[in-house]
Amino acid sequence: MEKVRSLFIPRPGDVPARIAICMSGAGSNAEVILSLAASGASGYVPVVIFTDNPEASGAAGLSAKYNVPMEHLDIRAFYREHGEDDIQLNSEKRRQLRNIWSEKVWQILQKYQCDFAVFAGFVPLTNLADKLPCLNVHPGDLTLKNPDGSRRYAGLHCKPVEKAVLDRCKFLRSSVILVQSYSGSGQHDLDGGPVLGISAPVQVDLHNSTYEELETIYRQRGKAPFNDRLRQIALGNIENLKIQGDHVVFPQVISLFAKGCYASDDDGRLFFRESADGRWNEVETVEFAGDDSRMIRPAAEKIMPEKKNKLLRFCKYLYVKMVRGNGSPDYIARGWALGMFVGCVIPVFCQLIVAVPMSFVIRGSKIGAALGTFITTPPTAIFIYPVQIWVGNKIIGGDLSADSAGKLLSVFNNEALSFAEKWSAFADMGWALVAAFFAGGLLWAAIMTPATYFGVRYLVIRYRNIRKKIFESIKKERSRA
């Protein structure tokens, strides 16, 4: 392995990092960052708020509210002073002006002895990253790639979300990257830095439109700017993603970056450690949830085989289905507990035809009842059933042989047998094996069913409370604006 180098070395003695917040718009991301810093638990302290848009941005208000100095250099006014009415990087003169403007920004920030900068809705492309580390949040999952290796959801403004919608993605994510320098027009360098963190998945809202309708709108587009249904849906999803994605992942990544938890090597691989004295682990990225928890996503090609990757995705799918289910927490928890009970007691080949009808009887979640049975599937049954039968054999005082579980599994997993033939073969194995199976299953269910009920109920309530706090915070912010 090449030498691992920290992306940021913290100041000695637990002194918080000094950060510059760069913003162009209303500043909802900036306010979340400032609010966390004010709590004293962030590991960083904002020392300056910089804006390129002093007339229309919320920088002045945030500066006054959080008592952080504000600096500005209006980029459009700067370009007009030099005879240009457009700030796009589509000519050599405009590119030169951008370099001059960026150098002036750096001179401003230097006065505050900043350790790094964060781009909280900062619009202009700048090579400020040549001078100090810069973090940026992006409305798209930058870990997903095209066949040629380029990032699928890179791009400015609404493009990443529109592309995800047209790809029929069910979920969106926010990504936090370490900004890299650009060249030329910057189009080929956009969003190319290491992905330090991604948010948990945020569901796409089509606002009663269909994918077919939106694809038709996209094909019929003329020349920009656009104000069609696809753009409106993209803007709505960006706002939702900002609340559930940006506001969750960005402050946490900034805090960990300030504590020196990220590194890279000469090959550009990303490394992460939980604390300053911890061990570096190669990662693809780190996923952050709304409850301040995080999950390391190891570098897939070296640490996580494809089977484990699929298992992880399936577990995340179950979690999302659980906490985002419709109905009361008790309704959801009853369904999952029922599914767990059926998964423990009923043979794997007929669990669904038992669990789903029973969910109507107990008034529990149908989806939970179905998915809860996945405690036992053909891959997991080979581990669970031998233990279940051994315990059940002890309970009934039987004398089953060691290969009894193997015979049972050979019947359950035999795809050549029909449903009726599997039941017949199960019954033909003798009362001792059948009794041991149900006795062990009932004991297992007696432990797992109440644990599942209270565990699911807790997770659903916690998830909803987190969402409620986030939306209340945004509502208060908007009422003050």
Image: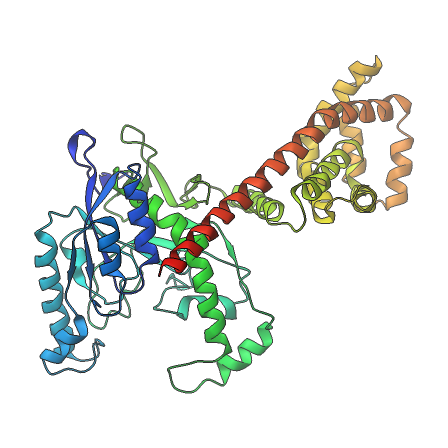
Viewport quadrant of the N terminus: top left
Q: Is residue 147 above or below residue 336?
A: below
* Residue 269, image x, y percentages: 30, 46
Residue at image x 49%, y 44%? 466
Viewport quadrant of the C terminus: bottom left
**Going by the image, does 464 lie left or right of 114?**
right
Residue at image x 39%, y 51%? 247
Q: In this view, does 266 lie above or below 80?
A: above
* Residue 368, image x, y percentages: 69, 45
Q: In this view, does 120 lie above or below 365?
A: below
* Res 440 quadrant in image: top right
Q: Is residue 323 above or below residue 444?
A: below
Please say whether residue 137 is visible from this viewpoint: yes
* Along the line of sight, the residue nearer the viewer: 322 or 33: 33
**Going by the image, does 205 lie left or right of 110?**
right
* Along the line of sight, the residue nearer the viewer: 103 or 239: 239
Q: Residue furthest top?
A: 397
**Going by the image, does 21 lie left or right of 330?**
left
Residue at image x 83%, y 12%? 397
* Residue 409, image x, y percentages: 76, 33
**Going by the image, does 37 lie left or right of 430?**
left
Please say whether residue 143 is visible from this viewpoint: no
Q: Name the colour scheme.
A: rainbow
* Res 364 quadrant in image: top right
Q: Residue furthest front?
A: 480
* Residue 142, image x, y percentages: 39, 57
Figure disc tally: 0
